[in-house]
Amino acid sequence: MTGKFFFLVSVLLTLTNADNSIIPFYKEALKTLSYQNIYILQQKSRTLSIEAKKKQQYLNLDTGIMYGSTSAKLLNHHFNNTDIGITDTIDLFGKSVEEIRLIQLQMKEDRLLLQVQKEKLFLSLLSMITAYRASEEKLHIYRKLYQTQYTLLNAVRSAVKAGDMSMIELTRLENTIALAKSQMDQEKETVTVMKEQLKLFSPHHTIPRPVSSTLHSSLHRFIANSPQLKLNDNRAKQSLQKIKRLEQSWIPDAVISANQQFNDDPTAYGNNYTLSMGLNMHFDGSISSIVEKQKVEALKIKSQKKSLEIERKIQYITWKNQYETAKKSFTSLSKTLKEANITLKNMRTAYLKHYIDLNTYLQTIEGSLAVHEAQINAKYKMIRNALILNTLSNGVIYE
């Protein structure tokens, strides 16, 4: 019991950390892109459609006016007929209820499509943020290395003046440092561009610095929160609802009509009034074929669920394996990095004392730099995959 308690506490702490860093930035990006506003407008449109269907159930009026002039052989003059009629078709048996249910399912689909968009945005932002922070750390390493190399350059210049090193050696080192400066400037430009791109999404929030690398996720929760699977279920329900609506299309509507005729026919009884009531039934020979087609579509949508579940499981397995691999690499590279830093320091001293040549020293720098870069890449790959699995499993981005 105690173990479960501490596990839940750790989960909550992880989610809180994620919320404090990534979620506010992500939520402002949602506002910037107007995802929520578009969804609200869609919902208003659907709600108005439902209200229209409800009103149409009892108020569906048709009105008409006809004028005619008639001549007869036995009459000296023609006579006039004016007919004014109004008809109300009433959904007495509740056919519109099925149409309203279909609109309600479409409203749910709008919400699920929004969740799909939210997930894509979160994944995109997280990739951009981790790439930005990784490049930022690499730039810091490049600057630190450049400063160290520049200090070494001054020492070599002094050695050249003292006649302990050749001018060729100094020139080669200057060229190497100039190249390192160029690479550092390029990385700085990349970091600046990435920062500006991220600020377009969320101009009022500081770019998050994700640090959480603890995995608190499960396959069950990851699948349960999948908007793609929920969307597929909803579309299957819509197909079944369309079938139900088609199957009830034969149900009659009540028809009430009132008609007034103005007639100056001298042989008739004058103006007359008529009130009629009846039932109107619609029969379409193609309905049965359309229903069968819709049933096939419903089965097709339903059969896609298994495929979507497998795709979601593959996503989970892939991200989890990437997390575990990156975690192992980060741990291993962190140990290697300590040794590489010591080696680099010793090799710098050895170079100044002429124990090794410049090529050997530069190879040591390249090796140390490669370890640094690999460690940073592993670190942010581990963080990224942990945050993906934790956040998608907890479902906070879909709210």
Image (cartoon, grey):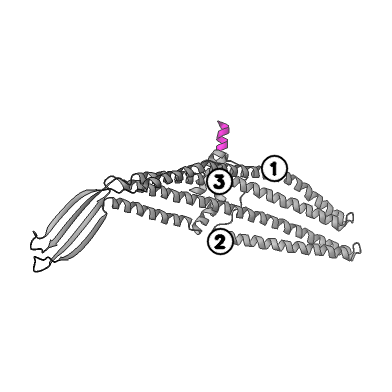
Of marks 2 and 1, which one's residue comes earlier in the chain?
2
What SS does tag 1 mark? helix
Q: In this view, does 138 lie above or below 294?
A: below
For the residues labelled 2 and 3, the Cα–Cα distance comes to 23 Å
**Residue at 76% across / 60% down in the picture?**
147
**Residue at 88% across / 66% down in the picture?**
167
| Residue 375, x across and y down, in percent | 71, 49
For the residues labelled 2 and 1, the Cα–Cα distance comes to 35 Å
| Circle 3 crowding by C-alpha within 10 Å: few under 14, some 14–19, many from 20 | many
Of marks 2 and 3, which one's residue comes earlier in the chain?
2
Which residue position holds label 2? 200
Residue lying furthest right? 163
Res. 271 image quadrant: bottom left
In the rendered structure, find residue 391 and report the number of the disc placed on it. Answer: 3
Which residue position holds label 1? 328
The residue lying toward the viewer, choosing from 246 and 351, is 246
Of marks 3 and 1, which one's residue comes earlier in the chain?
1
Amino acid at the residue labelled 2: Leu
Quadrant that contains the N terminus: top right
| Residue 174, x across and y down, in percent | 81, 64
The residue lying toward the viewer, choosing from 182 and 150, is 182
Residue lying furthest bottom? 77
